[in-house]
Image (cartoon, rainbow, N blue to C red):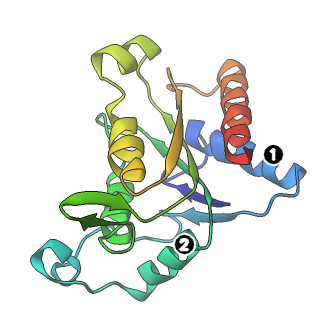
Amino acid sequence: MLIIYAHPNKDGHCGQILKSIQNNLTKNKIEFKLLDLYEMNYNPILKNSEHYTSGHYEISEENKNIQTLIKNENRFIFIYPTWWNNMPAILKGFVDRVFVSNFSYKFVHGIPCGLLKGRVTVFTSTGASRFSYSFFLGRRSLKVLAKDTLNFCGFKTRCFVINNSTKLNDQQIKKIDKAVKYGLKYLSN
């Protein structure tokens, strides 16, 4: 299992999601690898030499190694906060630099064809209420990552939102543990 974590700290809601996942996986003797984008000091900036729609196809050694990890796995977890109704820039840059044409998708007769397989559970935290996030904001951060990107690349996804993530307390921890339980169950099917 491969976990992609995109938050600069581990003290809040996203950190608690990660901790709950790691505890569950360790308890059930399930091996996992963690890509903590901030700890890796991952560079999210797409270089001109990587801009494949301009005919440039350079892929850094770091990103080749990440692509190998992705190709060799079929279960994934993404954890990130929703900021400004989207994923953090570091995660968007990770997607731009790793999920490139001919690795994650290709066009066949003008129709996109996902090249990756597996299941993904996506967890995000937001300060918005469930009603606001769903109805006013349209769950956009999840749509961009899960539907518009991961599904496009061939993955099957399941998403979980931890709403009202302004203060981590016992009630929020219980909500996180419940979401993690269902998210991991999805990956085990």
Instruction: Tell me: 82 left or right of 17.
Output: left
Foreground pick, 167 / 42: 42
Q: Residue at x 81, y 45 (%)?
A: 24
- Vertical placement of residue 56 versus 124, above or below: below
- Extreme left residue here? 54
Q: Nearer the viewer, mark 2 or mark 1?
A: 2
Percent across and percent down for residue 48 are: 15, 79
Q: CA distance from mark 2 to mark 1?
A: 24 Å
Give the label on residue 1, or none: none
Tell which of 131 and 170 is nearer to you: 131
The image position of residue 26, as x and y in percent, is: 84, 55
* Farthest front residue in view: 109
For the point 37% across and 85% down, which residue is it?
A: 60
Q: Name the amino acid, label 2.
A: Lys
Q: Is residue 139 above or below residue 60?
A: above
Q: Is residue 129 above or below residue 103?
A: above
State the residue position of label 1. Answer: 24
Q: Quadrant of residue 179?
A: top right
- Quarter placement of the N terminus: bottom right
Q: Is residue 138 above or below residue 119?
A: above
Q: Describe the element under mark 2 as helix, strand or loop.
A: helix
What residue is disc 2 on?
Answer: 71
Query: How many numbered marks, from 0 up?
Result: 2
Q: Secondary structure at mark 1?
A: helix
**Residue in the image at 48% along x and 45% along y:** 80
